[in-house]
Image (cartoon, rainbow, N blue to C red):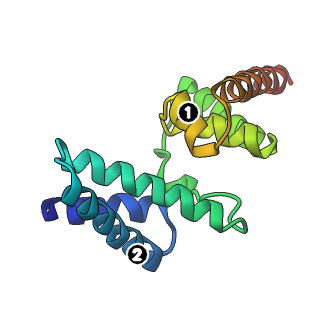
Amino acid sequence: MLDYYKELLLYIKNKVSNKDNAQDIVQETYERVIAISNTQKIENERALLYKVAKNLIIDLSRKNKNITEIPFEKDTHIEKYLTEDEVIKQNQQDILMQELKKLPAKRKEAFVLHIIEGYTKEEVANIMNISFQAVEKHISRATIELKEKIRKKEEL
């Protein structure tokens, strides 16, 4: 299980801006996984470590209501020379991120967890403590709203 320590720490550091928080999350992740391994057999330790870490990151972000977004340094993610298609795609992503920030909190959370983070709708319902139907409704409305706003901005 310790073979994944550095890998897990790097993953968490990329998700959490504070180094101390990242180390705390790694430690708590290992504590929880070890506790689970004492009561049941773990088939895939690496997958469980990542799942627990991801849940702890979500819990931390919920506790820190002051944090409204994850810092993103555009210069480190965009090549110096982009093709026209890449510029259009980047522009759409910029519009998407701007409009995503404007969505109501629950709608945004459901959309991000399912579409961006890759959780199933059932997992999103459990994380958010809402019904499966509510998750579907939030994701559907967010998708429709975001597509419409992107279309309108592209027409300008």
Residue shown at 74% from the left, 37% from the top: 107
Q: Label 2, on which residue?
A: 24
Q: In this view, does 91 lie above or below 85?
A: below
Secondary structure at badge 2 equals helix
Indicate left or right for 41 with 99 as reference.
left
Q: In which quarter of the image is the N terminus?
A: bottom left
Viewed as shown, does residue 138 lie left or right of 13?
right
Within 10 Å of the Cα at label 1, are there few (<14), some (14-19), or many (20+) other Cα atoms?
Answer: some
Vertically, is 25 above or below 86? below
Task: Give the residue at mark 1.
Answer: 114
Say left or right for 144 vs 85: right
**Of all residues shown, which one is farthest toward the front?**
39
Give coordinates of residue 41: x percent, y percent.
16, 47
> Is disc 2 in contact with disc 1, using a CB cutoff of under 8 Å?
no
Residue 142 at x, y percent in the picture:
74, 28
What is the three-letter code of the residue carrying label 1?
His
Count the marks: 2
Q: What residue is shown at x 19% (from left), y 43% (from top)?
A: 44
Q: Determine the image quadrant of residue 35.
A: bottom left
Q: Residue furthest bottom?
A: 20
Q: Quadrant of residue 150?
A: top right
In the rendered image, the quadrant that contains the C terminus is top right
